[in-house]
Each structure stands twice: as structure tokens, then as C-alpha cells.
Image (cartoon, helix red, strand yellow):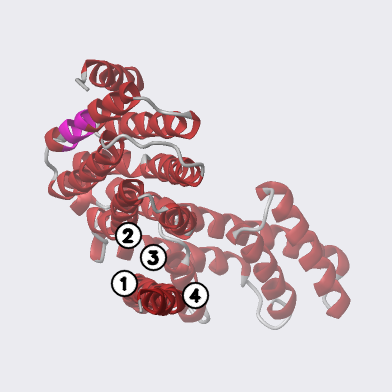
Amino acid sequence: MVDDRRDGHAAHEPWRALTERGTRSVAEARQHGRAAGRVRLRQLEIILVIAVQAGLAATIAALIAAPLLGPGAHVFAPAAAVGTIATAIGQRARRTVQLLGGVGLGLVTGDGLRFLLGSGIWQTGVMIAVAVAAALLVSGRGSALVGQAGGTAVLISSLTPMEQGLQVPRIFDALVGGAVGLLVVTLLLPVNPLRILDRTTAPIFGALTNQLRSVAGALADGDADESVRVLNDLRNLDADIERLHEALAGAEEVVTLAPVRWHRRRQYHRYAHTAEQLERLIIDARGMSRWSANALQYGESIPPALPQAIDRLADAIAELRRESRAGDEHEWSREAARHSAQLAGAAARAGLHTFGDGLVADLRTATSDLLRATGCAPEEANAIVREAAGGASG
């Protein structure tokens, strides 16, 4: 009877494992679905803001250009305004300069070659080729300058034979459109730079906090597969980091150009300094998850203080976000980071092997990077970590 029961339990083990993996997969799919939904919601909000800005800028440019610049201006000036708005946030001022430079380069090239070669189909091809080549030589790569130079060359070669005196008004059209585009994004409808940063950093802060807690739990439970899963999830944050770089450029542009946002400059720069360190923390977290997976797979002993140190680092990251959003001093995040370093020192003195030592080294690096995110100089952050790790009691 006992043997029969044992055989029954053994037969059910594969099904139980399969059920657990299925449940875990469903939970992960739901979590990823919720995260993707939040990203789409943030993207929809940005799309709505840019769409409203573009519509308003085009309307204002047309109203200004039509009575002042004559026929055609009601098309070209709004097009230039939309071109300024539609570019990536953080590059609009540069885009406007490129737009004006491209128009000027296209006019000079197109009008000069038209004078030498005349007008026609093959002449148009030559003008465009020369204008684009000249723009690429100036900019060194594809940009708004290249597109505008080529487009303006097409305009000059195609329309000038039918309508004289088009060159100079075209420059003013671009100037009015670009100026109106900048006016809308800096004065009439400027975005909130802190809101941009907070919405962009939220998924990164959340992922770092949750995944570090998962690493701590994996070490405490001896679950090497969980550490591997965390490593894979952390590798999927590259798109979030790219969006963060774009958000930093956009927020910097707003606090520089928009007078109504100048009072946010100090808080923005503090938050931006914190956000810039998140990429370092992601690299550190990847290293910790990799070391932890290896330590567990090779059966190394894990002192209880080590998962506690990682869990405390997750607390510090959560506090860092809260303080950054509120504009508070980083008192609590620094204290949590210091405590994490103390626990890491205690774990090292308890006795570690190869992969455990690597894990503690990355943990101390992450603690130092977090302290740098709070405003500490690199030397100061390293000194705090060394002192805390050396001063802990076992």
C-alpha cells in the first residue's frame, strides 16, 4: 500500500511541475500584458499632445502667412510648422535650424543650376542630386536639412518656370512655420518636463525594484531558474532606456526654451541626474542576477544577509523614485543604500565562494551607483559603501 501511494505520488510529479510552469507562464503573460498596456497608454497621451500641437501650429502658421506672404504661403508655412512639431521631442529647435538651412541650400543649389542648365526633367534630377549631396556633405548624415534641401530643389525646378519670384517667399514661409512651431511647443502648449520624466522612468524603477526582490527571493529559496528569468526580463529594458534618453532630451528642451517651465529647472536637473544613473543600475542588476543564478546552479552556500542586502537595495530604489517625484531630499534612499552595503559586508564575512563574491561586488557597485543617483560624488559614494560594508557586524 505504501509503495502504491509512493508510485502514485511519483506519477503525479510531472503533472504538478507542468501545472506550476503553466500557472507561472500565465502570470508572466498577464504581467507583461499589463506593462504593455501601460506603455501604450503613455504613448497615446504623447501622440495626443503632439497631434494637438501640430494642428494648432499649422492653423496659426496659415493664418499668419496667407495675408503676409502671398499665394502658396498658406501651404508651405503650415508644412514647416508641422515639420517642426512632428520631429522627436528634444530636437525641435535643432530641427527648425536644419529646416531653414535646408531651404536655403536647396534654393541656392536649385536656382544656380536652373540658371546654368535651364528647366526640364533631367535638369530636375541633376538639381536634386546636387542639393542632396551638398546637404549630406554639410550634415554628415540624413536629417531634416537633407530632406528640405531636396524638396526645395524640386520646388524651384518645377514651379519657378510657371511662377517667378518664388525663391525668397519660400525662405520666409519656412521661417514663419518654424517659428510658429517653436512658439506652440514653448509658449502655448509646453509639456510638463517632470511629468515626461516621471512617466518614462516609472517602468524602469518598477522593473528594477520588482526584479531585485525576485533575485532576493530566488537566493533565499534556492531557485536558480527564477534568477535566470530575472536576467532575461532585465535584458528587455533596452527599449525603456531608449525612451528615457528621448525624454531627457525633450524635458531639457522644454525647461530651456519654455518660460512657463523655467521654475522647474532645479527640480528637473535633480530628477534628470537621478534618471541618468538608471542605466547603470540596470547593468548592475543584470550582473547580480547572473551571479546569483551561477551561485545557485553550482550549489554555493548563500548567507541569509545576502538576499536581505539585495532586498534592501530594492527598497532604496523605490525610495529614490518617491523622493524624485516629490522633490524631496534623498535621505531615506541613502539610508536604505547604506544598510544594503552593511548587509553585503556581513554576507562577505560569513563566507562566500566564487560566484557569491562576484554577486557582492556587483551589489556594492549598484549601491554606489544609487548613491551617485542621489547626488553623491563618485568618491563620496564609494567611501560610504566601503565604510558601511566594513562597519557591519556579522
Residues tagged 3 and 1 counted as in contact (Cβ below 8 A): no
The x and y percentages for residue 219 are 35, 46
Q: Nearer the viewer, mark 4 or mark 2?
A: 2
Q: Are marks 4 and 3 in contact (CB under 8 Å)?
A: no
Task: Answer with mark 3 or mark 1, whichever residue precedes in sequence.
Answer: 1
* Marks 3/1: CA–CA distance: 29 Å
Q: Which mark is residue 203?
A: 2
* Pointer 3 residue: 181
Residue at the spot x=82%, y=76% of the render?
119
Image quarter of residue 359: top left
Q: Residue furthest front?
A: 1
Q: Is residue 335 magenta?
A: yes
Q: Looking at the image, do the residues carrying marks 2 and 1 touch, with CB atoms under 8 Å apart?
A: yes
Marks 4 and 1: in contact by CB < 8 Å?
A: no
Q: What secondary structure is marked by label 3?
A: helix
Tell whether 71 sits left or right of 42.
right
Task: Give coordinates of residue 268: x percent, y percent.
Answer: 24, 44
Relative to 317, is 207 above or below?
below
Camera-side residue of 360 and 200: 360
**In the picture shown, does residue 243 fall above or below 343?**
below
Residue designated by label 1? 38
Figure check: 166 above or below 363: below
Q: Earlier in the sequence, mark 2 or mark 1?
A: 1
Along the viewing direction, whichever of 206 and 45 lies nearer the viewer? 206
Mark-to-mark CA distance, 2 and 3:
31 Å
Image depth: mark 1 or mark 4 in front: 1
Q: Secondary structure at mark 2?
A: helix
For mark 4, what is the residue?
A: 79
The residue at 44%/63% (across/down) is 178
The disc labelled 3 sits on which kind of residue? Gly
Q: Which residues are magenta?
A: 333-339
Secondary structure mainly formed by the magenta segment:
helix
